[in-house]
Each structure stands twice: as C-alpha cells, then as structure tokens.
Image (spheres, grey):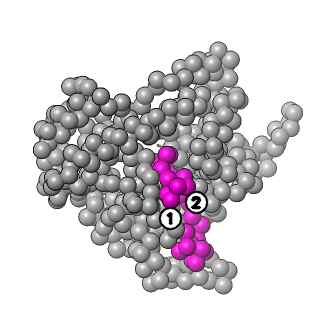
Amino acid sequence: MQNKLVNLIQDIYQTKEFIPLHAPRFDGNEKSYVNDTLDSTFVSSVGAYVDKFEKAIEDFTGATKAIAIVNGTAALHTALHMAGVKRDDLVITQALTFVATCNALHHMGAEPLFVDVSRKSLGLCPEALERYLEEHAFVNDEDECQHKSTGQIIRALVPMHTFGHPVELDELISLCQRWHIVLVEDAAESLGSFYKSQHTGTFGAYSAISFNGNKVITTGGGGMVLCKDASDGVRAKHLTTTAKVPHPYEFFHDEAGFNYRLPNLNAALGCGQMEVLKEYLQQKRELAKVYSEFFKNSAFNFIEEPEYAESNYWLNAILCPDFESREAFLKSTNELGVMTRPIWTLMHRLPMFSSSMCGDLSNSEWLEARLVNIPSSPVKLA
Ligand SMILES: *Cc1c(COP(=O)(O)O)cnc(C)c1O
C-alpha cells in the first residue's frame, strides 16, 4: 500500500525527489508586486499594499473588516484581546490543535481549558462542550460564564478548523449565546473553507487567519484578524498600529498598543497570492478527490469534508487503523522521500499545559494515535 501511494504521489508531483507536505508557489504577480515595494522603498509600515490586501480578504471572505497582522499567532492574540480576555480568565479550546492557539492566550495570563473534538469534523465538539458547561459552569449575576470549582470566568471559546475542515458552527454559536461566551475562531488553516456557504472566520466576533509559509497562501509570515463589527475593526487596527492618534506630526498614543502591522513588503506578496487563491483551491479539491479514490477499499480512511461544509483541504489527512500501522506508515513513506507527519501532540501533554483543566478527551486521543497528513501542495494534475 505505502509503495503504491508513494508512486501515486511521485506521479502527481512529477518528481522522484523529496516531496514536502505543503510548499508555497509563486507563479502569479508576486515578484512584480514585491519589486514594486523595493523600487518605491515603501517596504515597511507605510504603503498601499496593506490596504489592498485587507480589501482582497474582505471581498473573498465577506468579512466586515480585515486587519493585516504580522503573523497568525499575533492575530490570535489581537482577537483574544478584542474579545476581552484578561489575566486568569479561562479560554475553552481544543487539545487537538497547533500550539499557537494556546500560546497566544497563555501569554495574556489566561489559561486554556480543553474539551474534546468530534471524530467527524476533527474540531471542537458541541456535545462535549455542552456536557462540560452543564457540569462545571454557571452564568453568574453579571451574565458571565463562571467555572464552578475555580470561580474563574470562561471568557472565550476558540474552536479551530482543523486542516481546513469547518467545525459545527451553528451548534457552537448557540452554546456561546446561551452561556455568554465570546466566539473567537482560529481560522488559521481555513482560508477558502466555507460553512453552509459562508466563509469560516466570519461567524465569531473575531477570528484569526495565518499566511505562514505552509498555509494555503503565504506572505512569508503574516496573518489577518477578521472582525464582525465595523467599529471593532477600527479599534483592532488602532490597537495593532501602536494606538497612535492620527496627527500631522505629534506622537500621541491613547492606550498600550501592539506593533503588529503587516509590513507592506509582505502584503505585496499577499496581493499576488490572492490572485491565484481560487486556482489553488480548485487544484486542492481535485487532489483530495484523487486521494479519496485511492484510499477507498483500503484499511486507511481518507478524511472528507463534513457534509455541511466546503473545505479548502489545506492538509489532506488519513486515519490509520491503529497506532502501530501509523508508525509503519510514517516510517516507510518518509524513508521513501515523501513527507508525511502525525497530527500534533495533544496540548495537555505539553509541559506548559499539562496542568490545564480538561474535559473528557477520548476522541482527541483516539485521533492523535491515528491521524497522518500526506502531501497537499496545490498542483496541476496531468
Ligand atoms: C498556523 C497556525 C497558527 C499560527 O499562525 P502563524 O502565522 O504561524 O503564527 C495558529 N493556529 C493554527 C491552528 C495554525 O495552524
């Protein structure tokens, strides 16, 4: 099976050399836009590409306001700050995520609280969340969600659209409303993914996208905060650009801001990438179809988009029958020069989050032992 798969992947990417999990591609206007910033010397915090890139993301996602940020982790930090997350607050998220989700809230002095994911979406499970809240939380007199045993406020919920597959948003939104929790989507991996025809990241009050080098499109490093509310967008922009009050020459800053603005140089790259995004998404869907066919009638299950969603298939994933077959699969494919990777170690096993509170995590653990990513770079099929 592994040998047949390696042959298929070498055919798809037309090479016998090493094949990475996800490589960037620049075959549009990227070079000319980046050169333009060099020629004009506007490579840094001033320049027209930042506004253009934000507008392109707003048009594509339908978000009210998009603010370009230095990276996805900083975008998450900004989104959580906007959501009112404070020192000692609890933020509910998945143990099955990339570490950036938890780092962002940890550095704010907040603590993660892990609930289980669904085996279907690979993202935060509404039933698990409801069960946890019913047992461990109550809405206090100030209309805040409070943890029964510690008294901490559960300020925000951060579901993550794993590998680009959207979580069950309707159910999570109604739980957030009922329990007075702010919804912040970690949409770092889901640019181009839609839940019931609406773009992911536009459901929460705030959300974060990443343009790291391995994401669907890249700006080298970069991110975006999406705001549902236009005035929140204005405030997020202000906050992430040192909170400077506009003035022809005076320096006056009206709060402790962040220097999180995406440089014009990176935004120029982003503008070029936005022009090819739709083509990449189409190619990724076709690639997913080929994998899906390949794994039919095998012991390995290809992860399909949930029926309510259109996924960007950022990273294609398969479920191995058990941990032993996962190990064998990883070993043989990597030895043959085809990069495959297990899913991230669950957050509650990492030293800095090992004493965090958790609900039942049996689906997360089941998936952790079996999930593997296979090469997913957009490619024109022969
Ligand atoms: C990539 C990613 C991030 C962080 O993005 P950076 O741009 O690398 O800081 C956050 N969360 C998830 C789930 C990611 O996959």
Q: From the viewer's perspective, is 178 left or right of 333?
A: right
SS for callout 2 = loop
- Disc on res. 203: 2
The x, y position of residue 149, in whole percent, is 48, 82
Q: From the viewer's perspective, is 111 left or right of 374?
A: right
Tell me the quadrant of the picture where the N terminus can be found. top left
Tell me the quadrant of the picture where the C terminus can be found. top left
The residue range painted magenta reads: 173-199
The x, y position of residue 56, in whole percent, is 62, 38
Is the residue 59 above or below the residue 88 in the image?
A: above
Q: Which residue is mark 1?
A: 169
Q: Is residue 188 magenta?
A: yes
- Which of these two is toward me, 349 or 71? 71
Is the residue 173 above or below the residue 274 in the image?
A: below
- In whole angstroms, how far apart are the C-alphas of marks 2 and 1? 8 Å
Q: Is residue 239 visible?
A: no
Count neighbours of disc 2 (C-alpha within 10 A) and say few if under 14, some if 14 to 19, many if 20 or more: many
The x, y position of residue 376, in whole percent, is 33, 39
**Do the CB atoms of the residues marked 2 and 1 lie less than 8 Å apart?**
yes
Q: From the viewer's perspective, is 265 left or right of 281?
A: right
Q: Residue at x 55, y 83 (%)?
A: 138
Q: Residue at x 26, y 44 (%)?
A: 291
- Which of these two is toward me, 103 or 380? 380
Kind of residue at badge 2: Phe
